[in-house]
Every structure is written in C-alpha cells, then in structure tokens.
Image: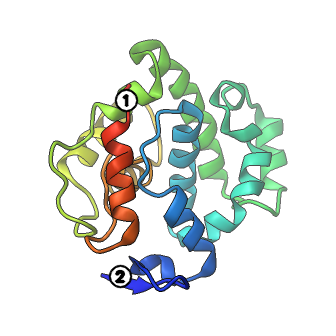
Amino acid sequence: MTTLAPDHLPRCRWCGAAPDYLAYHDHEWGYPVADDVRLFEKLCLEGFQSGLSWLTILRKRDNFRRAFDGFDFRIVASYTEADVARLLADAGIVRHRGKIEATINNAQRALELVDEAGSLATFFWRYEPQAAPGPQVAAQTPESLALSKALKKRGWKFVGPTTMYALMQAMGLVNDHAADCVIRARVTAARQTFARP
C-alpha cells in the first residue's frame, strides 16, 4: 500500500502520516547498517517506542542522542544511579524508569556481545532472513523471534520479537518497503552492494 508523496511518486503509506516521516523513510528506513552505535541506538529507541508512536520517538531522537551520549554503548554501560536520575528529569525524552534502566543494562550486555561476536553488527546480521515474508505483511518472523530469544538469553531487555522485527526493518536486514514504493529499488540496490559483517 502506497501514497503519493509531495514529489508525486509513490511511498509506503505510513510515511504519509506526518511530514517528519518522509526523510526518515527515504534516507534511513531499510538501508543496511553495520555501524554498532547506530544499531544500538535503534534497538534502544524501539524499546522506548513500546506503547507509543514512532513519530513521538522520531521527534525526540536528537534529545535522546544528547541525553544518552550519542548512544555510544561503551559510555552508557558505565551510567550510574545519578545518570538515571538525570534522565528521569529530562523532559526532552521519554521518562520511563524501566526503559532507561533497560538501556543501561543493554549497553552492558552490548559490551559482552561485542566480546562474544566481534561486533553487534556481526551478531545481528546472522539473523538476516533468507527470504522476506513480503512487504509489510508481518509483525514478527521466525528470525525476529530467534533474535529476541538469543538476546533475552543474554540478559537484554525490551527486545521482544515484534520490536526485533522493527529493528530488522529499520536497519536493512529486510527490505520491507511496499512493492511499488519508489524507495524499494534504492534499498534493494544498497542491500546488493552491502558487505555483510
């Protein structure tokens, strides 16, 4: 399902819901990512989104980056209770103690995962599906369920299978752009030239 964007070309219908979505859709969503900090950021933001709209998180993303040291998990892993208090007082982000503490926990688990796998990207890309289920028809897949279980086993939080599929969509492990979305072919080309970690 698509909608016509201001340039009169078809885009995934969801990005027509608000102007903030269009740049994210056209330049980020679905393009393959191997950068560990970007992967960690997206995983954390997906966790913060739980129960909220992605638009809310997208509009606060710069505030989140500032508050969490650019989501450099090497720094976030050393956060203390004083940092939790600082973050709970920050009106620019979602002030949810459980999600804040999960982000710190996940940063600590990310350090362990880098020691285990060499990088977060190496670990996450192991779960790239051999065949995608078809554009925008699934909320979770066997691969997102397996990734969720693997992370939970390692002590990660807010990493359910639906959240992990959203991560896979956003970070390019699948190309979930609608079949007639003008960006789908661009993402396909980017995935073809992407060097898997």
The way the protein has been coloured in the rendering is rainbow
* Screen quadrant of the N terminus: bottom left
Measuring from the top left, give residue 116's x and y in whole percent. Answer: 41, 14
For label 2, the residue is 2
The residue under the point 74% across, 55% down is 62
Q: Is residue 83 above or below residue 197?
A: below
Q: 62 or 144: which is nearer to us? A: 62
Q: Which mark is residue 195?
A: 1
Measuring from the top left, give residue 148's x and y in whole percent. Answer: 33, 42
- Is label 1 in a helix, a strand or a loop? loop
Q: How crowded is the residue under tag 1: few (<14 C-alpha within 10 Å), some, or many (20+)?
A: few
Q: What's the residue type where badge 2 is placed?
A: Thr
The residue under the point 34% across, 44% down is 191
Measuring from the top left, give residue 162's x and y in whole percent. Answer: 34, 57
Is residue 81 among the parts visible in the rendering? yes
How many numbered discs, if any?
2
Q: Which mark is residue 111?
A: none
Q: 3 or 109: which is nearer to us? A: 3
Q: Is residue 127 above or below residue 10?
A: above
Figure quadrant of residue 136? bottom left
Q: Is residue 35 left or right of residue 95?
A: left
